[in-house]
Amino acid sequence: MSRTKKAAAVLAGALLGPLLPTAAQAVPTGAPEITLKVLGAFGSGCPKDTTSAQSTADNTAFSLSYSAFRVYGNDYKSCKVSVRLSVPQGWTYAVTSVVNRVTPDLDYQSSARLQMNAWFTGSPWNASATNSLSGPDTNLWTTTSNTGTLIYAPCNKSLDLNVNNTLRVNGKASSSAELIDTDSQESTIFNLTWKTC
């Protein structure tokens, strides 16, 4: 290679270098892995060792599951659960919606009512909803609470999510409702959106 061509190549490399992504400059793609830890679950709807948390395969959501949150007519159960969310450095997330899935078995003149409150400790984000269902009904009951304004978690910080659910059934003692989708084994789902810090 001639000196002229070599000098041109060096100059082009110097000019283009800052524009080309390096390993340190590359923007991560896809959703990162979420680490979830149930810190505690308290209430008649979640006896010891009946509550779990898991993320989806693509990490775009995570869910809580209650295996003993079933209520019969003229009774109610509640549960407050705290879950620690940790994500890799350089990422942050916001909750876009909260979905509750209830399996009802309601007779005529029976009804179910679900109250949900969720918030992050130390964050302004919170969500709440109250929904009712009248019988007869045995179809999966799904409620969705959408987030109006996205509030992203602080970067490089773990947050504790608190969820308080109360499920009440009115009517015949034979009627019931269970806070879980018996097919997917999901009770409360938190859908997420991600961005880099």
Image (tube, rainbow, N blue to C red):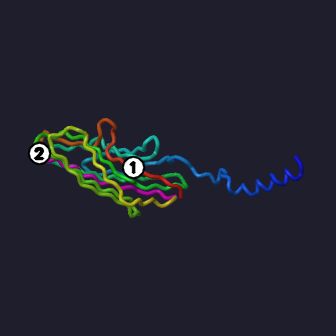
Residue at (62% x, 51% y) in the render: 26
Return the residue nearer the eye: 96 or 16. Answer: 16
For disc 2, the neighbor class at 10 Å (few under 14, some 14 to 19, many from 20) is some
Which residue is label 1 attached to? 191
* Residue 94 percent across, percent down from the top left: 43, 56
Q: Nearer the viewer, residue 191 or 69?
A: 191
Task: Report the span colored magenta.
Answer: 156-171
Q: From the viewer's perspective, is residue 193 above or below residue 121?
A: above
Residue drawn at x 72%, y 55% as measured from the top left: 16
Q: Are marks 2 and 1 in contact (CB under 8 Å)?
A: no
Local secondary structure at mark 1: strand
In the foreground, 21 or 182:
21
Compared to 45, does 105 lie above or below?
above
- Residue 123 is left or right of residue 111, and the answer is right
Q: To which residue does mark 2 refer?
A: 171
Whole-percent x, y for residue 140 in the image: 25, 40
